[in-house]
Amino acid sequence: MAGRAEIENVRDYYAKILPFYELESVARAHLNFWRAIVRQQQPARILEIGAGLGRITSALARLAPAVGIDLSMEMLSVAPYPRRRKAGRKRGAPAARIRDASFVAADMRRAHFGPVFDLIVGPGDPLSHLTTMKDRRGALRAVAAQLAPGGRFVLEGLYRRRLETAMPRRRVRHAAGVLEIEEAWFPVGVGNLWHARYRYRDRRPGEPDRTAQAFFVARSWDPVGVRRLFASCGLRVEHMWGDLDRRPFWRGAPRVVIVARRRTELPRR
């Protein structure tokens, strides 16, 4: 994502699929994993990069103040803003610990709040849209610069073996019907680049089907070079897991989850 045109392509992609992505995101939130990370780390402040619809940021804000950033204004415009619940609470039940959630439209490569976050998270691999190593290093250096000393970065990374991959069709039930999703990934050249294709069909009784298809180019992670890349950006990798159950990474894993800590001294830009 080297320039303004690439940024606009990413924004246009998410604007196009927003109605479908919003329905799908309920099934893809993985909230229990991220809540467990927060409870383990006990951060004073959290930053989510690529916050999208803000569901994870808002959920984590129940545990600690959280900020979510994203390029897409369309996504952030529908992000939920938690409020302290008063009415409807059962007698004797503790009050919901919703502390604070805020959202900022920002480029993850250039956002800079200062070294104030004890935990930075990247669910769903927002770095996958950064297809050049220059941009990927820029984003990782920005992460390191915003981590408080000793702070940690947890990234749910895109990982795919170098084969043409068609995913099974998924069905997500929602209040008004069923969303069908077809997903296919095709390798492009070299360097872990992929052409991703998504097709959506929203079926609702008594209404015409709503459909959309969208494409984008993404870069997956090469686990062999992760530690060296992170180290060059001021981050020391502590763990590499192959799934959200925290099993050590293996060749056939569905993803790579990277847990890194800010190094004492940050590299010069």
Image (cartoon, rainbow, N blue to C red):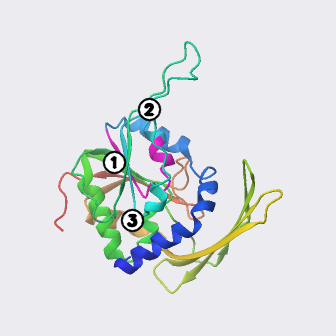
User: In the image, is 28 to the left or to the right of 73?
Assistant: right
Disc 2 or 1, which lies upstream in sequence? 2
Residue name at image x 44 percent, y 32 percent:
98
Question: Disc 2 and disc 1: Cα gap in Å?
Answer: 22 Å
Residue highlighted by disc 2: 98
Q: Which residue is mark 1?
A: 152
> Residue, x 27% and y 56% (percent of image)?
144
Residue that sits furthest to the bottom in the current view = 189
Residue designated by label 3: 226
* Residue 197 in sight: no
Image x and y of residue 110, in percent: 27, 64
| Chain part drawn in magenta | 45-58
152 lies above or below 35: below
Determine if the magenta segment contains residue 57: yes
Residue type (three-letter) at the residue carrying disc 1: Arg
Residue situated furthest right in the rendering: 206
Pick the residue in front: 201 or 114: 201
